[in-house]
Image (cartoon, helix red, strand yellow):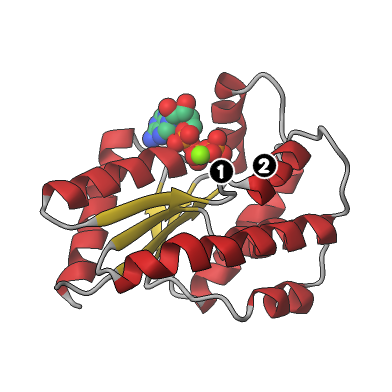
Amino acid sequence: MKRGAFIVFEGLDGSGISTQAERLELYLRKHGRRTLLTKEPTNGLIGGMIKEALKQDWKTSFKSLQLLFCADRAKHLEDEIEPAIRDGRIVVCDRYLFSTLAYGFAAGVDTHWLFNVNRAFRMPDLTLFLDMSPDVSMKRIANGREKRELFEKADALNSVRKAYLNLAKRFNFKIINAEQSPDDVGEEVQQVAAKFLARR
Ligand SMILES: Nc1ncnc2c1ncn2[C@@H]1O[C@H](COP(=O)(O)OP(=O)(O)OP(=O)(O)O)[C@@H](O)[C@H]1O
Ligand SMILES: [Mg+2]
């Protein structure tokens, strides 16, 4: 049986994370790999609470919001990610703990606290960061949503991007230029993923 792997996509809102996660999963499956396409926040109960908080349907502090993300993540790992990796699948995850670190940091939550509450979670084997300017992100969001979510303002997205770029150095992300067409981004993603899988 082939070894499982854990591949994560991160980026600003509208950077094409969901689009590219779906494309990569399809590409891997076409190449004979067994996969799991999944996302955070999850479609479970805790994920539902988070989505409502992001839509600002109810109020939570930034710290309690990040703890909800962590609770959702713990269950996600136990129920889905870990079993799939044990089963030899390639898990492609649309956002993971770096979203907590970057968005939490941008919201002013203490970095050490954020790292500590995420400490016990498995690290990805490959993190693809879809990088784009906050301006382009805002334009994509404007086309796709009726109402802006919690972090979808230019200055907040600026801080999120800065936090991501710091994490990119520390955790060795592969940085992809997400301002290209979906096909061109997809090409780059496939190349990076294929190279990564060939080395394992
Ligand atoms: N490379 C691209 N060029 C132009 N538009 C794109 C590109 N990638 C995705 N889009 C469009 O941008 C919007 C957001 O894409 P997508 O849902 O994949 O992003 P996301 O990062 O998952 O965003 P979200 O924060 O909404 O989850 C969609 O309307 C999508 O069709
Ligand atoms: Mg998405």
Q: Secondary structure at mark 2?
A: helix
- Residue at (49%, 62%) from the top-left corner? 79
Dot 2 or dot 1, earlier in sequence: 1
Residue 75: percent from left, percent from top: 58, 63
Where does the image place residue 134, in percent across and percent down from the top left?
61, 41
Q: Which residue is mark 1?
A: 43
Identity of the residue drawn at 81% across and 32% down? 57
Alpha-carbon neighbours of circle 1 within 10 Å: few (<14), some, or many (≥20)? some
Where residue 175 sits, quadrant-wise, is bottom left
Please indicate, yes or no, whether residue 63 appears anywhere in the rendered image.
Answer: yes
Residue type beneath disc 1 = Asn
| Viewer-closest of 60 and 144 | 60
Relative placement, left or right, of 108 versus 21 is: right
User: Hey, what amino acid is under mark 2?
Assistant: Gly
Q: Is mark 2 within 8 Å of ligand 1?
A: no
Quarter of the image where the C terminus is located: bottom left
Disc 1 is placed on an element classified as loop
**Residue 150 visible in the snapshot:** no
Q: Which mark is residue 48?
A: 2
Mark 2 → mark 1, Cα distance in angstroms = 6 Å
Task: Specify the quadrant that holds the N terminus.
Answer: bottom left
